[in-house]
Image: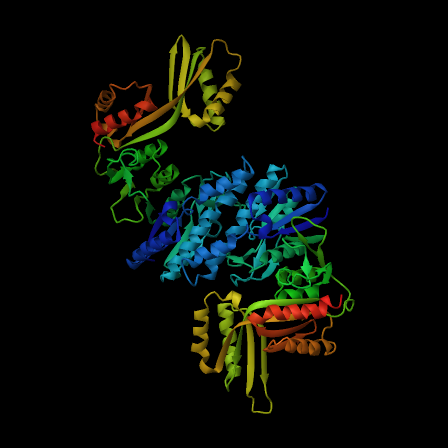
């Protein structure tokens, strides 16, 4: 029998009626002869309200305790979903991340799955039960509860699918797949019916919220196809799977990201400063998106480094800036309120045509570029946060709308 | 290691973030007095009721295992928030759920019993930290299933932890101790400084909602003195212990409403029938009380149950008594059971005389007694009058 792993996001399980209608969907999949594992997120805005509650007590709550707190959200959903499934006559059982064998490192709030031991899940599937697993959570080797960061339920689902050697992994949310840009920002965004793992991973890392980057990485390693679908139904879906290289050309998507912070280290000690900063970032779990360090060979080793981090992980900005100024003084400059727009596509940098034309376009649009970085799948422009929307729009028009 | 105290805070004491902060201050104060604390918490305010309501919207009869999975989230929320509040004011601590604290229970979902406590992890944490916060009300089976101990089970978690760690046990709520009777019914109720385990057990099973009766059983077994006090006032509370230093004849009065008297009359004079009836009732998990059996040619049996269980009892009885001629079963509802409890009754005479004198003007339906208790069944309309008369007579 083939195993299907389904994941339902928070908006798909936001209230009792939605949970009941999902139970019916699962009923159909089970009745058509599949073994079903369901991964759920917390209901609607539960996670946000728990964070608010913690913040009303402390500006700087312990990460371990936050994981203890936030992981309750998924547990509520999974037990309610099982109650709904049992009500329909489908035997089911809910398992916490820990019971399902999702072992992570101990990096609280942003843990990485290091191993999945799905013995209990397999046993329950063998008992002909639908297994409902709390997403977003795991357990560290210290037996502490961990969470996998935003979008972590995707990772739970794909990691389980890989460990169970599932036929496919279906990710249900309130959008019907992946678009050439965030459809809530760009109404002309095109639906993408299929994508390679590499492109999807690049999109997720550049800020696309539709699928979590580690989840795509797991799927790639285990060669499991991800089906991104809308939970309320609809014809469209996006399949992320293994695709031969070189089939698609040009820009596939324009992805944006807000709330970035750039640190520029200058001065004679900057090599040491970077090292110190990296240690600090490791301790405080700042998420580094990009690091560039250039040391001039001609000027006696003097160089410059820039580090881009996501502001979303830093709850307490004042403490953050205080720490940096205390440790590095004048040798660091902090730039807040930045954003980025990335063009994603196979072999996008095979020649310089796209980057040159894009720069011309951005200049014509009177948008200031604060930095550029590239990989073989991506060209990223760093901008002021307020310019991100305009830049996304002009780039999307030129490279997607006008070409298709 | 320093002296360890186990404290428990009930749902109303941790109902919102302001209250959690106050509880944190109270704990910090105790740590300054050179104690290490194990703190057991209930779910915040009405959380458990709300979660039950949510599950009932999906199914009137949710699977017990899934209900436990659902309900145990409540304590995990309050435990982690309390740990955050404590760290904020400089008290080093971590929260542990039942899985992490290894509170092993039986597998009876919704009403599991604690089997074993491995306090190794708690002790190890207390070497470094000032306090450990434990989710009350919940346990884990050998197989790793999450269970709950029944309503009020956090008391049991606390007393069991105190027993396992040979620590003092303090239970805090919004009531400043144990009273002669429910202060909400009788505002003049007096606070008891001491009450024995046996008295407390009678009170718990008779409708006084101060302590989970299983917690008192464990305290009795291991000789743990329980202090019951108010979370937010400094008022002196009550001690539940082996001996009552003050030795009053009657310590307390408790009232249980919604009683139904079940009367079976004209049964044949066959005592195996008595056995069959009560065995059947027990099998159905029904709690009966105030049993009376009279033989006058035939057999007349009566007992009381909670009104909610009337239909269940009726079904059970008709299953074993079907086809019996002349049998008459009556169900009379709307009664209250009023009990007085006191360890001193054992050694003093004349309590019954005083009791019936107090109730002289009240039509009493049924009376039962034990060594330390007298209970009577009256119609609800006479409840107030009876309670007043007994309180006056026994100076409660």
**Furthest-top residue in this view:** B297
Q: Which residue is found at the position 71% from the left and 57% from the top?
A: A238
Q: Is residue A315 above or below residue B250?
A: below
Residue B372 visible (yes or no): no
Q: Which residue is found at the position 35% from the left and 25% from the top?
A: B336
**Left/right of residue B314 with respect to residue A185 in the rendered view:** left
Which of the 4 image quadrants contains residue B31? bottom left
Q: Is residue B349 above or below residue A206?
A: above
Across and down, in percent, residue A115 comes to 61, 59
Q: How many marks?
A: 0
Across and down, in percent, residue B191 comes to 25, 39
Across and down, in percent, residue A171 comes to 65, 54
**Left/right of residue A151 with respect to residue B16 in the rendered view:** right
Q: Is residue A34 above or below residue A137?
A: above
Q: Is residue B319 above or below residue B239?
A: above
Q: Quadrant of the C terminus of chain A?
A: bottom right
- Residue situated in front as seen by the camera: A7 or B275: A7
Which of the 4 image quadrants contains residue A343? bottom right
- Residue situated in front as seen by the camera: A22 or B113: A22
Across and down, in percent, residue B247 comes to 22, 35
**Left/right of residue B31 with respect to residue A318 in the rendered view:** left
**Left/right of residue B178 with respect to residue A124 in the rendered view:** left
Residue A99 visible (yes or no): yes
Q: Which residue is found at the position 30% from the left and 58% from the top?
A: B34
């Amino acid at each position: 029998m083939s195993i299907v792993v389904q994941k339902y996001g928070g908006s798909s399980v936001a209230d009792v009626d939605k949970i009941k209608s999902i139970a019916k969907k699962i009923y159909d999949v089970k009745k058509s002869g599949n073994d079903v594992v369901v991964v759920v997120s917390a209901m609607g805005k539960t996670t946000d309200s728990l964070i608010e509650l913690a913040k009303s007590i402390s500006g700087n709550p312990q990460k371990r305790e936050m994981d203890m707190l936030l992981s309750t959200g998924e547990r509520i959903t999974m037990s309610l979903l099982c109650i709904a499934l049992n009500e329909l006559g489908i035997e089911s059982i809910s398992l916490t991340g820990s019971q399902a064998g999702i072992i992570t490192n101990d990096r609280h709030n942003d843990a990485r799955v290091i191993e999945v031991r799905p013995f209990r899940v397999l046993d329950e599937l063998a008992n002909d039960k639908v297994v409902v697993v709390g997403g977003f959570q795991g357990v560290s080797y210290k037996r502490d509860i961990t969470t996998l960061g935003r979008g972590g339920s995707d990772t739970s689902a794909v990691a389980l699918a890989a460990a169970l050697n599932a036929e496919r992994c279906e990710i249900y949310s309130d959008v019907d797949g992946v678009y050439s840009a965030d459809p809530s920002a760009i109404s002309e965004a095109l639906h993408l019916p299929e994508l390679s793992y590499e492109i999807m991973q690049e999109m997720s890392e550049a800020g696309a919220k539709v699928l979590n980057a580690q989840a795509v990485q797991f799927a790639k390693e285990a060669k499991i196809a991800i089906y991104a679908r809308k939970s309320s139904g609809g014809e469209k879906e996006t399949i992320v799977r293994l695709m031969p290289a070189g089939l698609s050309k040009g820009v596939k998507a324009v992805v944006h990201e807000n709330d970035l912070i750039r640190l520029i280290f200058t001065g004679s000690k900057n090599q040491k400063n970077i090292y110190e900063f990296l240690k600090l970032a490791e301790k405080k779990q700042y998420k580094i998106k990009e690091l560039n360090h250039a040391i001039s060979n001609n000027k006696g080793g003097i160089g410059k480094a820039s580090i881009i981090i996501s502001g979303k992980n830093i709850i307490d900005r004042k403490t953050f800036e205080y720490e940096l100024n205390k440790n590095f003084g004048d040798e660091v400059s902090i730039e807040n309120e930045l954003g980025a727009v990335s063009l994603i596509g196979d072999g996008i940098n095979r020649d310089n045509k796209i980057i040159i034309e894009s720069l011309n376009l951005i200049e014509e649009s009177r948008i200031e570029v604060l930095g550029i970085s590239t990989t073989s799948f991506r060209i990223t422009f760093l901008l002021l946060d307020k310019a991100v929307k305009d830049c996304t729009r002009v780039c999307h028009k030129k490279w997607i709308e006008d070409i298709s | 290691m320093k002296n360890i105290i186990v404290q428990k805070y009930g749902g109303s004491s941790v109902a919102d973030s302001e209250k959690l902060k106050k509880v944190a201050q109270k704990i910090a104060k105790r740590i300054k007095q050179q104690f290490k604390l194990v703190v057991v918490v209930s779910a915040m305010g009405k959380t458990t009721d709300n979660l039950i309501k949510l599950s009932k919207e999906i199914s009137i009869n949710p699977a017990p295992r899934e209900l436990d999975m659902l309900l145990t989230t409540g304590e995990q929320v309050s435990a982690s928030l309390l740990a955050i509040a404590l760290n904020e004011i400089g008290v080093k601590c971590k929260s542990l759920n039942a899985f992490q604290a290894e509170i092993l229970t039986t597998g009876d979902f919704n009403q599991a019993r604690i089997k074993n406590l491995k306090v190794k992890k708690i002790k190890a944490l207390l070497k470094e930290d000032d306090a450990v916060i434990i989710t009350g009300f919940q346990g884990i089976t050998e197989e790793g299933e999450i269970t709950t101990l029944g309503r009020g089970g956090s008391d049991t978690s606390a007393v069991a932890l105190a027993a396992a760690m040979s620590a003092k046990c303090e239970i805090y709520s919004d009531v400043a101790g144990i009273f002669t009777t429910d202060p909400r019914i009788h505002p003049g109720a007096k606070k008891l400084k001491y009450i024995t385990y046996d008295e407390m057990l009678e009170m718990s099973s008779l409708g006084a909602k101060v302590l989970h009766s299983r917690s008192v059983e464990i305290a009795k077994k291991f000789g743990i003195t329980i202090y019951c006090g108010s979370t937010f006032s400094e008022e002196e509370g009550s001690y539940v212990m082996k001996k009552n230093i003050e030795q009053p004849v009657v310590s307390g009065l408790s009232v249980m409403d919604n009683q139904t008297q079940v009367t079976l009359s004209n049964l044949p004079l066959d005592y195996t029938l008595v056995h069959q009836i009560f065995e059947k009732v027990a099998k159905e998990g029904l709690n009966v009380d105030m049993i009376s059996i009279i033989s006058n040619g035939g057999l007349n049996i009566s007992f009381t149950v909670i009104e909610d269980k009337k239909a269940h009892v009726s079904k059970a009885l008709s299953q074993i008594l079907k086809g019996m001629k002349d049998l008459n079963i009556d169900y009379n509802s709307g009664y209250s059971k009023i009990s007085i409890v006191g360890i001193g009754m054992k050694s003093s005479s004349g309590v019954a005389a005083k009791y019936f004198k107090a109730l002289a003007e009240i039509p009493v339906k049924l009376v039962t007694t034990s060594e330390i208790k007298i209970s009577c069944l009256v119609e609800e309309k006479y409840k107030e009058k009876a309670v007043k008369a007994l309180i006056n007579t026994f100076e409660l």
